[in-house]
Amino acid sequence: MTIRQPIITVAGHVDHGKTSILDKFRGSSVQESESGGITQKISFTRYPKEQIKKACPLLKNSKLELKIPGFLFIDTPGHAAFTNLRKRGGSLADLAILVVDIKEGIKPQTAEVISILKQNKTPFVIALNKVDTISGWQKKTSVQESIESLPAHVKQEFDTALLTFQGALQSHGFESSLFYEVSDFTKELAIVPCSARTGEGISELIFVLCGLSQKFLTKRLELSKEAKGIILEIKKEKAMDSIEAILYDGEIKEGDEIAIGTLDTANPVIKTKIRALEEILPLSQKYKSTKSVVAATGLRLQITNKEGLLPGVPFQKINKNLSEITAQFKKELSQAIKTDKQGIIAKADSLGSLEALLTLLRQSNIQVVRASIGNITKKDVISAKANLEINPLDAIIVGFNVEPEEDLDRGSVKIITDSVVYKLIENLENYRKEKQADIERSRLLSLATICKLEILPQYVFRNSNPAIFGVRIQAGKLKTNLSLIDENDEQIARVKAIQAEKASVQEAEEGKEVAISLPGTNYERQIANKNVKYLYANISESQFKEFKNNKDLLSQSEIKALAELAEIKRKKNENWGI
């Protein structure tokens, strides 16, 4: 029986130290060279057996005989795409390291990662990073010794941070203990306190990964004769496109014919040959040409046919079984992207990203009518526009790690993009709440209009037939044909015309000063002589009650104007509006 390297994803919140921990593993400093210190793409590191032994002296003193040929680490951007890198039967990752800053605990992205790991049933270990930031922390021979020899006040700070974190994990449904106190690894998560800066706890983290891999994953790690993998990224090179991929099972050779999955139900596979094959070098970001590779490893491929190729899709070596592979891919990919009868449009940069996005949208009870890979196009906008009449809250396109095409006419469609899933969903939920409030407010104000006008006696342009004078809109909106009353509930007139800045308008907003024309009104007799200072839009009692029940949709000035109107009406009927 031959076993392969476990595939291990390193995940967690931005700035909690994922790449720094991997740098400690491989003795490099990739993190410093990256844009803003944030990992820009998924990348992999081959970590051979010799390096494990070198980085983990604990193995010598233990009874653990190392059988695995090494690890394949996947470093991931600060979002959820990686956790949903899928293969048949579940997650691509055999194990995950969840990196958490001891002082910050579970942040939104951490919770997002936990949610997807839980859903995919991916076992994981906690790297409780940045222990060296605890004031008074002193590094000893081992992290256990460091913890046990802490002065009382420092120990208290460590324990408080640890217990707070364990409580948060419990709320996600996980029991946990420090790795050297775990009695049953099937029931408790192992927490390894560590520091990517000082290197403390890194050896222990590797040791725990070795132990878990060999105790629980041996069956899963058995190599089969079928070569299977995932396309990670399609890169535009000078001469030609190159494809980054992970081979997670079997062996593949230059010249082999492979089937690659697509999202096209009419043509569910691309049939192609491997023209050139390169394998990632151990502890490096560089590749070396080779004739054959064995899983699990990172690859760069040149293929003969790449039309319709998308990131995140599966591939498999064809061995007189193309129809079987085709049926399997068709089933697998149709299950990956399930949509609803109505909802928003979702776009992402890869299949894994799209699956992650759809998973988290469902958890937020947001329906998706159409989901696809790639930048936001005119076709997406047309689809979203169709939602305007059905449900304006669905006239939205969300884009994860993608952008709208240049010069795209969005019309009334809202486009929301982000490279962090939780921010994307947060922005979407906030927008939908605001849009819902606008819709309800428009519906409410279509029944009647709230309006309070302050008369400007210095601007009387005509006394009667019609009376024309200036007003300032103190609350609500002024519209033509609006019925006005004074402070004594006396009917004045309907607004025939509104003039703003020497031009006729149909309506004017709060704060504006305009001239109004009131037919059948005598300004001097009905307004000046009665010392009328304000005019109000006349609304019925039932309309008033409707406004009162929806106060949350009104501005403070509109609420105040309504209260004044109620007082005016109650001069004649004390129970009006109650």
Image (cartoon, rainbow, N blue to C red):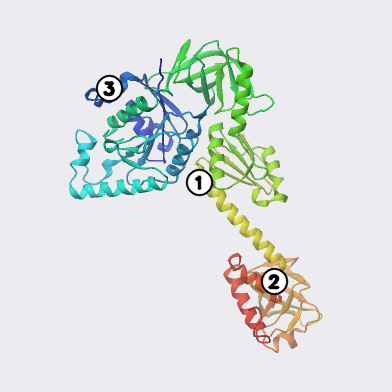
513 or 375: nearer the eye? 375
> Which of the numbered marks, if any, corresponds to residue 209?
none
Whether residue 168 is situated above or below residue 540 in the rendered picture: above
Residue type at mark 1: give it: Lys
167 or 371: nearer the eye? 167
Q: Is residue 146 left or right of residue 326?
A: left
Dots 1, 2 in contact, CB < 8 A: no
Residue under label 3: 54
- Label 3 secondary element: helix
Q: CA distance from mark 1 to mark 2?
A: 43 Å
Residue under label 1: 423
- Label 1 secondary element: helix
Q: Give the quarter of the image for residue 571.
A: bottom right
Of tags 3 and 1, which is closer to the observer?
3
Of tags 3 and 2, which is closer to the observer?
3
Q: CA distance from mark 3 to mark 2?
A: 82 Å
Whether residue 245 is situated above or below residue 512 in the rendered picture: above
498 or 110: nearer the eye? 110
Residue type at mark 2: give it: Val
Dots 3, 1 in contact, CB < 8 A: no
Q: Give residue 136's position: percent from left, percent from top.
A: 21, 45
Residue under label 2: 514
450 or 571: nearer the eye? 571
Q: Give the quarter of the image for residue 268.
A: top right
Q: Give residue 506's position: percent from left, percent from top.
A: 75, 66
Residue 420 visible: yes
Of tags 1 and 2, which is closer to the observer?
1
